[in-house]
Image: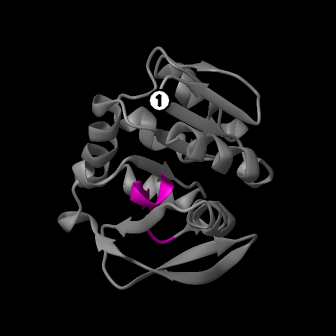
């Protein structure tokens, strides 16, 4: 049953607003428990088009979050968010723990930067925002231009237009 499955969304200020809010809503509507996890407590602010967007409450501070409490991890993009998170060793370790456990690990847009940092991209077929392609290939991944690419427990998508298929792939991985 979906209600017993918990999904973590790891993000910080500068997340692409649609890439956090839409999957969170879709996954909650599908019956999953979804927590926003961030290195900071309180709220984080999204990025919408060319300016700062809405804030989202942080459900669990990263220092208090355990990968063992979650069945899947979602990494929204935006350019700022994953760039800040990949400089946080606790965030990279959190991502690495999901990869090592073989739990669904989903990243969209610039989110795959965290897969590179955590060593989770090597030898995998992935997709991303086009500008992240070279980083993924340099990390040993095989890049493909597709709405959703699933390679084992790894799920990746390119952009906000892919959110419905991305969210469905995450939900299906937990069924």
Residue drawn where x is 57% and y is 44% of the image: 170
Q: Nearer the viewer, residue 27 or 147?
A: 27
Residue 1 vertical position relative to residue 135 in the rendered view, above or below: below
Image quadrant of residue 15? Answer: bottom right
Image quadrant of residue 105? Answer: top left
The picture places residue 172, in percent across and down from the top left corner, at 59, 40
Q: Classify residue 117 as left or right of residue 105.
A: left
Residue drawn where x is 67% and y is 46% of the image: 168
Disc 1: which residue = 153
Q: Nearer the viewer, residue 134 or 175?
A: 175
Query: Looking at the image, which residue sits at the far right?
Result: 161
Image quadrant of residue 30? Answer: bottom right
The picture places residue 7, in percent across and down from the top left corner, at 43, 56
Q: Classify residue 162 as left or right of residue 10.
A: right
The picture places residue 174, in percent across and down from the top left corner, at 49, 42
Residue 55 vertical position relative to residue 26 in the rendered view, above or below: below
The magenta segment is 1-13
In the image, residue 143 lies in the stretch drawn in magenta: no
Query: Looking at the image, which residue sits at the far front?
Result: 1
Mark 1 neighbour class, 10 Å CA radius: few under 14, some 14 to 19, many 20 or more: some
In the image, residue 10 lies in the stretch drawn in magenta: yes
Q: Classify residue 101 as left or right of residue 105.
A: left
SS label for mark 1: loop
The picture places residue 20, in percent across and down from the top left corner, at 58, 64
């Amino acid at each position: 049953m979906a209600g017993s499955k918990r999904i973590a969304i790891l993000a910080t200020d500068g997340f692409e607003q649609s890439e956090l809010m839409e999957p969170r809503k879709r996954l909650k509507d599908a019956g999953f428990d979804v927590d926003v996890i961030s290195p900071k407590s309180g709220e984080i602010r999204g990025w919408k088009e060319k300016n700062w967007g809405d804030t989202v409450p942080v459900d669990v501070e990263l220092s208090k979050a355990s990968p063992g409490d979650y069945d899947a991890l979602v990494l929204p993009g935006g350019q700022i968010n994953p760039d800040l998170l990949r400089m946080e060793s606790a965030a990279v370790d959190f991502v690495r723990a999901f990869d090592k456990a073989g739990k669904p690990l989903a990243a969209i847009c610039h989110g795959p930067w965290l897969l590179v940092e955590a060593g989770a991209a090597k030898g995998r077929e992935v997709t991303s925002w086009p500008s992240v392609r070279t980083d993924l290939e340099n990390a040993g991944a095989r890049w493909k231009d597709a709405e959703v690419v699933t390679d084992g427990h790894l799920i990746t998508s390119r952009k906000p237009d892919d959110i419905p298929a991305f969210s469905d792939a995450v939900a299906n991985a937990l069924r």
